[in-house]
Every structure is written in structure tokens, then in C-alpha cells.
Amino acid sequence: MINTLTRLLPNSQEGTLDLINRIEIHAKHVDVFLPLKLVGKIRESHHAGEKAAPDLAEPGQMRLTLPWRMQTRGGKTDILAGDRNTPQPDPSLIRALRSAQAMLERGPKNRPVLQSAPTSPWRRNLVRLAFLAPDIQHIILNGRQPDPLTLALLMKDEIPLMWSD
């Protein structure tokens, strides 16, 4: 939440925590109550799903609604800003995809070619990621992969040979 407020109010003279009057936590969003004078600045730079409006109960303050969600990966639960449509890049998955691509060379007709078999079992599994369908690779690089799609899942499951599968 601090990062979001810093993004929304980059030139604030006061500390971002000092601006907060009240916080309400709900199942899918957090309401942050701030001075009403900030509503114009926040509306200029808010992301999709974030809402800023005057608070009807308290005339001198505004209600900033920030979506959030919980994500469980590998037994660890993270609280993420944004709704399901907000990109959430997975650094380990992106790094693995780039490493897999780096193992390939360009052959005839600019097609990817693996010159020799990777030496370790890990690298043999990793190189399979380079042959994921281009649309899946694009989704991963843009941080729009579904929550269950993790590096661990891709490394243990079979990857279909046909992109359409």
C-alpha cells in the first residue's frame, strides 16, 4: 500500500503514512481515507481497478479503493496489489524462460536449434521452456500468467509438443 501511495502522490511534501486518516480492509479491496484535497492528483495517476472519490460520510476526506488479492505459490501466501487483471510478473519464471532461450541458437530459416543436449537433468528440463507456444511465452513475460502456472509446475509436468495443445 505504501508503494501505491508513493506512486499516486510522488511529490507529496508529507510522509505518505501521515496522510492516512483511516484504513478499512475488505475481502477484495482496501479503502484508504485521505484528505479530500488529494483527490485530483490521485485521479490523474491511478491504475485500472483503483477508485478515488469523495467520502459521503465525511466531507473533508476521500475514499481511495485499492484492489488486492492473495496468491499461494509453493506453500507461501503473498498479498498482491491489484485485481486479477493487474500484471504480476513472476521473476523466477521469467528468468528461467530467458535462460532456456539462451541455450538455443538460430539455425536455417532463423529457426531455434539446440546444438547439443544439456548436461544436467535440470537444464534438460529447463530447455523445454524455450519451446512453449509463443503466446504462452508472451503471457509469462507480461506477467499475465494464471496463478497456478509456476516454474515448479512447468518443470515437473510434460509440455505438449503441439502448440495448440
Image (cartoon, helix red, strand yellow):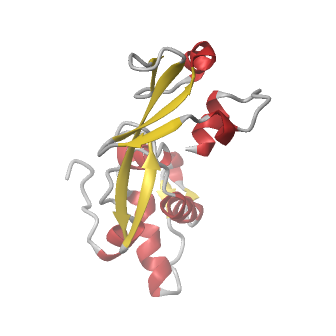
Q: In which quarter of the image is the N terminus?
A: top right
Q: Residue furthest left?
A: 165
Horizontal and vertical percent position of residue 17 = 65, 42
Would you place residue 69 above or below residue 114 in this image? above
Camera-side residue: 136 or 160? 136
Residue name at image x 27 percent, y 72 percent: 157
Viewer-nearest residue: 53 or 86: 53
Residue 11, image x, y percentages: 77, 26
Instruction: Place residue 85 in its image quadrant.
Output: top left
14 to 95, vertically: above or below: above
Query: Most extreme residue toward the bottom, as rendered?
Result: 120
Residue toward you, 84 or 32: 32
As drawn, is 114 to the left or to the right of 11? Answer: left
* Residue lying at 42% horizontally and 38% vertically, measured from the top left: 86
Q: Residue drawn at (19%, 53%), measured in percent from left and top? A: 165
Q: How many labels does the image show?
A: 0
The residue at the point 27 percent across, 50 percent down is 163
Left or right: where 16 falls relative to 97: right
- In front of the other: 47 or 33: 33
Give residue 68's position: percent from left, percent from top: 40, 44
Q: Position of residue 69 (x, y in %)?
A: 36, 48
